Amino acid sequence: MDALKQKRSTLRSAFKRSANNLEVLLAATQLKASDMEINFEQISERFKQLKEYVTKLLELLQKKNCTSDEYEKEYTTCESYEDKFIALKIKVKNVLAGDAKNRTDLLHYTDTASKCKLPEIQLPTFDGNPREWLNFWTQFQKIHEEASIDERDKYQYLIQSTVPGSTPREIVESFPATAENYKKAVEYLKERFGKESVLVQVYIRDLLQLVISKNKCELSTLYDKLQTRIWSLDSLGLAKDKCADILYPLIESTLPVDIVKMWDRQKHLVQDTQGKSDLDLLMDFVKNEVDSEFRVKISREIFNTGKITNKKVEKDRDYLPFLWLRQDDLEQVEEYRHRRVVFGLTCSPYLLAATLQCHLNRVQENLSCTSEILKTAFYVDNCVTSLDSELEMRKFILESQIIMSSDNFNLRGWKSNFHSIVPNGDTSTDENVSVLGLVWHMDTDTLSCKIEQTVTLEKPITKRLVLAIAHQIFDPTGFTTPVMLIPKLILQETWNLKLKWDDTLPDDLVRKFKSWYRQLYLIANIRVPRWFSISPTTESLSVHVFCDASQKAYATCIFLRVNQGDKIVVTLVYARSRVAPVKTVTIPRLELLACLIGARLLSSVINDLKLYDVNIYCCTDSTTALCWIQRDQNWATFVQNRVREIRSLTSPTVWRHVPGALNAADLISRGCSGEQLLQGKW
């Protein structure tokens, strides 16, 4: 038995050496079949001898009643050598048989982990349009000429490459799905849709269509269409040198008249033709014109960029010279160049605002009061302001015209609810005037929104349509906030449903939106006073801020209470609502967020209206939020950050508790219809 084991070990070592040598040959980039056959014969002979000795050894182990573990160990080792031999045998067989796939794996093995994984190429599709045949067949030809793919599989690929319901699909499916019929189907498609004479006529007719078309397009688009059709004809074997004389007048007729004139003037100046035909020279000329237009377009876009228009390249200053006459010597004329863009050279609201500010900073001291008003009254080129009396109004009109006319700005088109003081020639019988997106009713001195319901509800209701309609309403003060909260909530639901922009909304959302839209016109009847009733006779002022939240939204509104002695006037100043986050947030935290936007808006209102010495009352119906604000303790991070900002904008002592039924912000945190807002007291 010991002799058998020693002989077995020797044969195993010899088998391993032969196997390693064979694997080295298989992994080589250049492989000789003769060397591989010799090594395989050696390993086959050694495996045969090894198997004989192992068989004898296993029989001897059975006779001597060895343990099952010892026998199983010997048998398992024998199987591993047999598996190794079979694997090598298959590899050698595949290489000798010329299997392309296995040959690539064995002879040209590379580390594919370092290669980029490209996306899969989708099968081309064909719907029967002859113009698409070349694109289709160029891609499908790879499958058609692949020898390793069975003809029946190619037939299935051909079916998948045709558009369902199209003529090519019907033709292909009419043949029985056999290998013989695949070639027949391909030849039929080529004869029907890929005939070169038919394709040439198609592309020639496309060129004729460009000649007679009345729809003029940009030169770059026209050049692309012409070039692609010329390339298509060239791919069909229609040589340009043979058909250039026919295509030249045809293509020249498609070009704009001014381009043809430029070509006629310049074609005789072309020196280096390099044997090119007139058609090639014409297309090169058009390409140069397209490139020039593109460069000019880019330059113009950069020049008109707001942050760059104030910067001048040094050489561009040569285009902005001016003459300077000295008062002490009128005969001496000096030439200067501007160092920045001149006002009026291009349309720029930024330059206009900067020019106006520069002009207003240089007015005379006796006109400084009017100048300060003008600095904050201009929005682009519109001047909007309020004054306390007719006397002040007359003075403002006179002095502002003097200030603006000193630099040739013509301030005109005055509108006022005091018709008697409007300058001559500027009077108008219009009682409604558009002011910064709102409608100003001069007879009642009130403001309202513009509502134009131009959308019919018969069309599909999509997320894009809801957003477009909601953004048509311009309300800077927020008196329509309760109504405008509804489309915000609808949009949030569409995001939760993961609807695309042009997907039709579910029926429940459609009903909700249509109900809201039908009553939208009613908010045009809501009018808010333009004047807050603040006058020299006002005895006291107080600002009241209300904050509230619901599961859907949180909101705030600010009212101004004016005590005029004989009456009390309360006016809405500002309102704002925000949709609650998609992630669930507790009501107390939403109430705290409402208090935060209330504090921010309060700071803005006080600074804009200059209400520095007034009583302030901030109210919320949440005792938890009130506790967070009034107690100076270490809260959770979310609460602590917002409390810190609230306390920096307001004093904790101004915060009060108000019952929910009396909270003015309750309506705007829940939303309502146009009819409810019009009939309510909010």
Image (tube, rainbow, N blue to C red):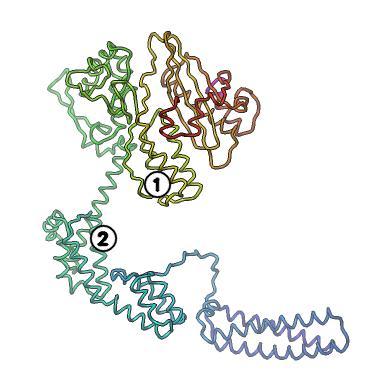
Q: What is the CA distance from the residue labelled 2 to the residue labelled 1?
A: 33 Å
Quarter-of-image position of residue 378: top left
- The relative height of residue 212 versus residue 48 in the rendered view (above or below) is above
Mark 2: amino acid: Asp
- Residue 294 horizontal side relative to residue 585, left or right: left
Residue 9 location, x and y as percent? 77, 84
Mark 1: amino acid: Arg
Tell me where the magenta segment starts and ends, as one range. Answer: 647-651
Residue 648 lies within the magenta run: yes
Q: Which mark is residue 85?
A: none
- The relative height of residue 358 versus residue 21 in the rendered view (above or below) is above
**What residue lies at 56% left-to-right and 30% top-to-bottom?**
591
Residue 114 lies within the magenta run: no
Q: Residue furthest right?
A: 64
Residue designated by label 1: 464
Q: How many marks?
A: 2
Mainly helix, strand or loop, the magenta region?
helix
Please name whichever residue, 359 or 658, is drawn nearer the observer in this view of the structure.
658
Q: Secondary structure at mark 1?
A: helix
Query: In which quadrant is the C terminus drawn?
Result: top left
Label 2 packing within 10 angstroms: few (<14), some (14-19), many (20+): few
Between marks 2 and 1 in the image, the one whose residue lies nearer the viewer? 1
Q: Which mark is residue 224?
A: 2
Q: Earlier in the sequence, mark 2 or mark 1?
A: 2
